Every structure is written in C-alpha cells, then in structure tokens.
Image: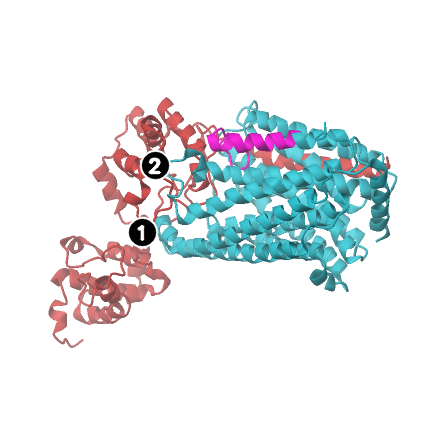
Amino acid sequence: MQLISDRENSATSLALLTGVFWLFIGVTVGALLAVQFIWPDVVRGIPFLQFGRVRPLHVNILAFGWLSLLNFGAMFYMIPRLCRTALWNERLANWLVVIWNLAVLGALICLPLGITEGREWAELPWFLDITVAVGVVILGVIIYKTIAQRKEPQLYVSVWYFAASIVWILIIYAVGNRTFTSWIPGFNTGLNDGIVNWFYAHNVLGLWFTTPGVAIAYYLIPKVTRNPLYSHFLSILGFFTIAMFYAPTGTHHILQSPVPEWAKAISVTSSVMLLVPVVTVLINFFMTFEGKWGTIAEDHVARFVFVGAVMYLLTCFTGPFQATRAVNTYLHFTQWVVGHAHLALLGTFTFWGWSAIYYILPRILKRPMWSKRLITAHFWMAFVGFSLFLIGLTAAGFIQASGWRIGMSVYHTVIMFAPFQYVRTIGGVLLWLSAFAFIYNVYRTAVSAGRPLGQPAGQARASLEDAATAVQGS
Amino acid sequence: MNKRYIVGFVWIMAMVAFIILITVALPRTHSTADEPDYLADYTPEELRGRQVYLREGCFYCHSQFSRVQDWDHGQVARSQDYYYDRNNALGTERTGPDLANIGNKFPDDWHDAHHRDPRALKPGSIMPSFDYLGDEETSDLIAYLQSLGMRGNRRKRAALARGEIWPTDEEWAETRHEVPQYIHQLYDELTEDPTFRSIRMEPRFAVNGQGIYNQNCAICHGLEGDGRGPAYLHGAMAKPPANFWEDRFDGYDDPMWLWRVRDGIPGTQMPPWRLSLTDEQIFYVMQFLKWVAEYNGLGPLSTPVNP
C-alpha cells in the first residue's frame, strides 16, 4: 500500500502535507469564527456551525492537526539528521501519522455535532483521547529508538527539546483529560477541575508547542545563517529552566477565582521566572543571526524564522507581566488574552512551522518550491494580516478593560469594541488568503513532478548524510 | 547510552513529577471544599441544562466567577459555590456577561426570548441565536441558569429547607438600591472632618456646587437638572439621564447621593466621579443636587443670593 510506505522521509512528507491540510481547515474555521463576531446571525439555525461548537474545533484542529503533525514531521526529519542515523521504523512512523490524522478527523466530526467533554482545550471525547495518547506513546518509541541507535555521540539541544516534549505531553495529557483521571475522587469536581483544566491547557502550549517550536528554530537558525550556535551552555540552561518553570503556571488563568492563594503565588512566580528560559533562547537566536542579518532579506526560511522569533519575544515579554496580579486584575477576561494566545500559536509557532516546511519540503521532495513569488505573497499577507488581527484584539481588550474599570457593563463594551472586531476580521481574512497561497504552493510542489512522494532508499541516504554533515559542521 | 543523558532524563522527570504534585495534586487534598449548607444540589432538570450549557460552549464567552473588582456583579465567588459542579465552567473570557449570579435576575420568559433572538432584546449583542435547541432543552438550560448565584434557585431551596425566609422580587429590588456599608463608613468618616461637616444645603454651598455641576454634569443632566442636557437632546445617550425633578430624588439622603455620584451607575453612561472629583467637590455637588431636587429646578438660587 502506497500510504504506509517505508521509504526514507515518507513519514516526514506525509506528516507535513497532512499538517498543511489541517492548517487550511483550521484557518478556514477561524475565519468563520471571526465573521461571527461581526455578523452573529450569519450561520443562524445551523447548529454545527455555531460559535460555541466551532471554537473548540478551531483550537483542536490547529493544535492537534496542524501544530502536532508539524512537530511529528520536524522530529522525523531533524532527529535522524542530528543523530546521523535513519529513522527507526519508517513504516510505524507512517502508521502513526495515519492514526493521528484519524483522531483529528474524529475531532472534525465529533465537535460540531456537540460530542464534547466541555472543558476548554480538553474537549475531545474519550475514544479520541485514547487514540491521541496511544499516538504519543508510538511517537516516543520511534524517537527514543532512533536516538538510541545514533552514531553522533553529542546530542544537539533540539534533540533534548524534542525528546523531552514527548514525555511531557504524555504526562500532561494523562493528567489533564477527564478520560484518564475521572476515577480519582474529587479530581474533576468543583474548583479542582478548574486547576487541572488550566494545568493541562497551559502546558499543552508550553511543553508541546513551545519546546518543539524552539527546537525547530534551534535547528533552522544555524542552518540558514550558516553560523555556529552562539552558546550551547545558554541553550541547555534554557532547556532546564523551561522544564522547571513552565509546568506550574496554569493557575494564572483563574487568578481571581477562589483557588488557594499559595497555588496562585506559585503560578505567578513561575510565570515571571519564565523570563529566564525566554531570554536565554532569544539571546541565542539573535546572536546566532549576528553578522548574517542579510539572510532575512534574501532567504524566505530565514525571514519566517526571524519574524517568528520576534513574535516569540513579544509573546514572552507580555506573558509574564500579564500573569502578575496587578496586570491580570485589569486585563483578565478581555480580548487581549485572545490576542496573546494567537501571538504565541500563530505568530510564533506557525511562523516557525512555515519556515520548517519551506526548509524541509524542497529537501525531501528534491525539487524547489513551486513558486517563490507565492512564498513572498504568503509571507506578507500572513504578516500584515496577523498584525491587523493582533492590533484589533489588543485594542478591543483595552476597551473592555477600561470600560469595566469605570463600571460599564459587558454588554456596553461589546458594542464599543465592534469596530476593532472588523479590523480583526479583515486580518483574519488576510490570514486565510495567506494560508491558501501556502497550501496551493505546497500542493503544486508535491505534485509537480508527477511521481509518488518519497525517495528510493539509497538516494535519500546519500542526501541525508550530506545534510547531517552540514548541520554538524555548522 | 551515555550515562550523563540518563541522569539528565531522570532529573527532568523527577522535576516534572514534583511540579505536578504541587500544582495539581496538592490543591486537591488541601482545598476540597466542604459541602456548603447554603447551597442545594442540582435537580435532574438543572443538570440536563448544565450539559446543554457545556455542549453548546457557553463557557467560551461567559465566565462564572465574579471578582472583587467587578462592579455590581453580585457576590464574589467562594470555593464552596462549585461544590456540586462535576466539570468546571469557570471560563476565561467575558465576551458575554458573567453568569455567576444570573439566577432569578431575569424571568424565565426573558431568557426564553433572549435565547431565541438575542438581538430582539439586546440590540448590538453578538450572542448566537439558540433557536435550534428545541423547547425542552431551552427550558432545561433556563432552569440551570436560574439555579446559579446568590439569588438562584439552589440557594432558594437550601434556604427554604433550613426554614429561612426567601426575599420576594420587590425586596431584592430594594436591597439592590441599598447604600452599601462602605459608603456609610466613608460618609461617617468624612463628616467627622469639620471641612465636610460645614457643607450644608444652603444657597452659598449650593452655588459652589452649581459651578462644579455646570462643568461636569450639565452636559447630560441639563443646566436645571431636568435630565434634558445637550448630549441627551442630540441623541447621544443610550438611556435618558436622571431628571432630578422626579419625586424619587426627594427621598435621597446624603449617603445615597454620595454613593450615586461617587461610584456612578453601572450599565449607564454615568461615570464614577471619584476618579475625577475630590470628595469635597462631590460634597458641594451633592448640596446643589439636593437643592434642585427640593425646588424642582434652581428655585431661589436663580435669583442672585449673597453668600
């Protein structure tokens, strides 16, 4: 069967191409949500397109469809090259991608029909929860077996991040989903469920999207700039501090609810301490760019990865301050928070994901991207669209926050932020266009030579060794 | 495999296990709330309504905890309030109003009409229409909403079971307009100060208040306090501003005036003037307002008086 191939790189290309497909579906759903903010009656009478049902779909498709499959593809491509070996069991990796795609397809069917657990970020019903958990276990087996058979004794920091993220997401997923914990008395009742819910929801961002995202950037930046990494010590320091400080931060989402004060104190403290890994990572990124700033203008991969790093700086410098009590009192519950979430997942990790795909696809498909001009169009539509989107949401958030502060009702602030919802929706439509340019370009690249995906084994191994030499030499 | 990496791996996992212990497991053992005596469990109908609430994703836009800084949202949340919840619905956005105290704030018919066609009752609202839900699910959902909060049916059932008196709607309406305790305290503290105590409803103080009033209040309430200021006459007000000639203002006492001027009226364009006026200025304005309410206009003030 062609789908379950055991050719070199076939799992990478399958994961990335299906990920691109889910990105397009997710962005389309997001555009539908943005339109509902300005024309709430646009899907009136169609239950499965209503805001409350489509919003979890948007989150789950983009988190588990796009970003997770991107992580899979990046791991399947980067880890063998960093370890100077082949991926352990390419066929199993292909199976994993298929299983994972079935889980995302299940989400696409279940969530609009109202089959949900009703907890933010943990909406997937029990059978999909189990599929996802099994998928993560399979991923762990593949990656750890690959690392175990490596020929390169030194582990680059990207491998650290990738390998640890798999174990983290498994633990976090098992703790955070009702499927696995509802047998513990009192775990999913009352306020405790809120604490567990936000432990999961924040850490799935922090330890499943941030860490592989950073790993991708750690791989790409030395590659595109052809500079050695600025400091390996800083990269390892960043790794250990993010492991230490990310996990307890979740409670800052319910900072003014009656959860125990010490739990709030821990979450605020560790949120602020996250500045340490962020600063180390960003120093490393920007100092690696030193002397090669021209690549941002010349190379589209470098451009995407650089913009992603700048967005990461914005995200991670606003985040810790938002989590402090004084600022949280003012900004909590507003659209600012929505903008912040998109700054991380769209501005940072999706931009890094795009750069990874523009880097990996031509190398494994052995042909350049179909259109350079379309990449430029993609970049500018995504950048301008996202900037408008962020400005709209941030301004709306300030309107809400200041209105509530002087005693206005939520109803009045909803009417007041309407113009900025138009700005956000225009940005959203631009982002949809950019996603369309992207998927069309990837599609034409994938089918352009009219031959099946993947490479004959010998040829790919030769190219693989070239690539591995290149990254180790950098 | 290199031993160094195994040590690193074990170290990381131990750290994560410790973090999960302190952030997820410890709050559970420490804060599991006792069963509240002021709150009854959900009825089957309310529970079905809660499932509809979770299924339709209401919690993506409506939060369910009112905070200390929320003005006029009702009682601040306590951990026992959530004792009977089998799945949290705390929410993290307020695209719609907080629903922690929504119970019995509006009648069932209002909720029914509002779910079917939100913009018929709240023009400009962006809530989706839930007319596809069907009568039974809508009534379950309304039963759930009416069970929430300080006036909700679950409190009512618990109070009646304990043999307490449950206030009627009119009595609730009166407590809503009761001057809060902190305003009484503030008023007592201020009037101990000779500066404030000397400000009485006399022409010379009312004239001083008139100046502040003309600068700040007359744009909406009108120069003579009849609620017909230029902003209102030109259609800039969503709700008509207060007309101080109405009889109800005759009954306002000093703390009531202080409360309304100082903290504003939520849901209207009346701002909390504590942000821009000093307490002394507010005291002068209060004397002018009392004067207007007393004489239904400027009365003797419109003829020149010598202070």
User: Which region of the structure is painted magenta?
Assistant: A99-123
Q: Earlier in the sequence, mark 1 or mark 2?
A: 2
Q: Decide if residue A133 is on the left or right side of residue B129.
A: right
* Residue occupying image coordinates x 16% and y 60%: B293
**A251 vs A423, nearest the viewer:** A423
In the rendered image, the quadrant that contains the C terminus of chain B is bottom left
Q: In the shown orientation, is residue A374 left or right of residue B252? A: right
- The answer to whether the residues at label 1 and label 2 have Cβ atoms under 8 Å apart is no
Q: Residue furthest front?
A: A450
- Front in this rendered view, residue B34 or B184: B34
Q: Amino acid at mark 1?
A: Gly
Is residue A47 at least partly visible in the picture?
yes
Q: Residue at x 82, y 49 (%)?
A: A471
Q: At x 48% / y 56%, what residue is drawn?
A: A392
Per the rendering, the colour in which chain A appears is cyan
Is A16 above or below relative to A288?
A: above
Total marks drawn?
Answer: 2
Question: How crowded is the residue under tag 2: few (<14 C-alpha within 10 Å), some, or many (20+)?
Answer: many
Mark 1 — on which chain does it sit?
Answer: B
Chain letter, red: B
Q: Is residue A187 left or right of residue B205?
A: right
